[in-house]
Amino acid sequence: MAHDLVALLGPDGVARTADLGRVVDRHSIGGWVAAPRLLRPYPGVVVLPERMEEWRTCASPPCTGPTASSATRPR
């Protein structure tokens, strides 16, 4: 079954793998990362490659915390 990753990840293009895993098989997520149709900027988080450099994506709830601050934001 083909999945629309933009629709699955929502307007910010980022999601927790646990949340995404409730909708699709975890092996699908791994395949998308290997493809690379998704990137894994932090453990437990996936993002669309075209959204990776956007501050809004990095500041979304799945990325906030000690591993994602303005100091670790992609430049």
Image (tube, rainbow, N blue to C red):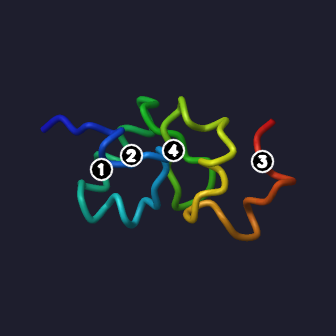
Q: Tell which of 47 and 43 is nearer to you.
A: 47
Instruction: Choose the circle earlier in sequence order: 3 or 4.
Output: 4
Looking at the rendered image, the quarter that the N terminus falls into is: top left
Residue contact between numbered discs 1 and 2, judged by CB atoms under 8 Å: yes
Q: Residue placed at 67% from the left, 35% from the top? A: 53
Instruction: Choose the circle earlier in sequence order: 4 or 2.
Output: 2
Q: What residue is disc 3 on? A: 73
Residue contact between numbered discs 4 and 1, judged by CB atoms under 8 Å: no
Q: Residue placed at 56% from the left, 36% from the top? A: 51
x and y, in percent, of residue 14 in the image: 49, 50
Q: CA distance from mark 3 to mark 4?
A: 14 Å
Amino acid at the residue labelled 1: His
Q: Residue placed at 30% from the left, 43% from the top? A: 7
Q: What residue is disc 2 on? A: 30
Determine whether, in the image, residue 16 is placed left or right of residue 6: right
Q: Which numbered disc, 2 or 3, marks the residue closer to the eye?
A: 3
Instruction: Choose the circle earlier in sequence order: 3 or 1.
Output: 1
Say which element carries label 4.
Answer: strand
Above or below, comparing residue 36 to residue 17 in the picture? above
Q: Which mark is residue 27?
A: 1
Amino acid at the residue labelled 2: Gly
Q: Tell which of 4 and 18 is nearer to you.
A: 4
Q: Which numbered disc, 3 or 1, marks the residue closer to the eye?
A: 3
Amino acid at the residue labelled 4: Val
Give the total of numbered labels. 4
Looking at the rendered image, the quarter that the C terminus falls into is: top right
